[in-house]
Image (spheres, rainbow, N blue to C red):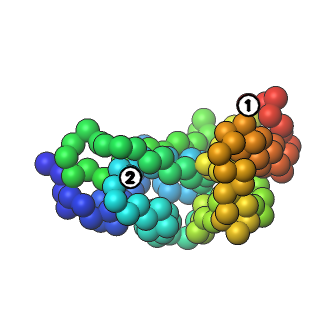
Amino acid sequence: KVTRPGEMAVQTKMAMDGVITVLEGMGADAGDLMKLTAFYVLGDKPDEQLILDTMAEALGNLSGPGPAVTLVPIETNCFEGLGIEIEGIAMRGHNGERLARTSSWIPDGPNLPAPFSHAVRCDEMIFTSGQTAEDEAGAMQHPGSLSAQSRVVLDKQQRLLAGLGADLHDA
């Protein structure tokens, strides 16, 4: 049974609590997250900032760079009233030790609340947050041109990867 249908903040908090509970069951915690992807039902008034802020609050203060994050709007979910599903990727070393990581930021990347990163590297793995063709002020560049917007997004990805010692050929 879906809990609190239509209440995005409550469902987001519950989903994040579920992710953290699974991590703890595996001997890990929120500080081991490298990537979070949230699939949310678009609805009439999508509030991506509410989703990001609620996810960030659930993570709390992390000791190092936070995970990359991507929000994916969807038309509907598998259960009536279910507004969001969240999946995460976490990493620990072979002996259970926390792995070092670094992050990369670009000025025209998405406006993410702490502790999220535009991109994060852990060992040979790199995870990037979702990028769009928006400029630093949030205006869409090249409206109506999918190819021009794709070039903008690929340029952003290239700059994020370069900040972590990689390039698009490593993707």
Q: Quadrant of residue 67?
A: bottom right
What's the distance in space between the residues labelled 1 and 2, CA to CA? 29 Å
**Amino acid tagged 2:** Leu
Residue lying at 20% horizontally and 58% vertically, measured from the top left: 5
Q: Nearer the viewer, mark 1 or mark 2?
A: 2
Query: Horizontal placement of 153 versus 159: left or right?
Result: left
- Along the viewing direction, whichever of 55 and 49 lies nearer the viewer: 49
The image's mark for residue 150 is none
Q: Residue furthest left?
A: 1
Q: Position of residue 153 (x, y in %)?
A: 72, 45
Residue lying at 21% horizontally and 43% vertically, measured from the top left: 79
Q: Position of residue 151 (x, y in %)?
A: 77, 41
Query: Horizontal placement of 114 versus 124: left or right?
Result: left
**Amino acid tagged 1:** Ala
- Along the viewing direction, whichever of 86 and 29 lies nearer the viewer: 86
Secondary structure of the residue carrying tag 1 is loop
The residue singled out by tag 2 in the image is 42
Residue 72 visible to an observer of this rendering: yes
Compared with residue 138, is residue 104 higher up or lower down, i.e. above or below? above
Q: Position of residue 102 (x, y in %)?
A: 74, 53
Residue 118 visible to an observer of this rendering: no
Q: Earlier in the sequence, mark 1 or mark 2?
A: 2
Q: Position of residue 74 (x, y in %)?
A: 40, 44
Disc 2 residue crowd, few under 14, some 14–19, many 20+, Cα 10 Å: some
Residue lying at 76% horizontally and 55% vertically, measured from the top left: 104
Residue lying at 73% horizontally and 65% vertically, measured from the top left: 136
Compared with residue 59, is residue 168 higher up or lower down, i.e. above or below? above
Q: How many marks?
A: 2
Secondary structure of the residue carrying tag 2 is loop
Q: Quadrant of residue 110?
A: bottom right
The residue singled out by tag 1 in the image is 171
The quadrant of the picture occupied by the C terminus is top right
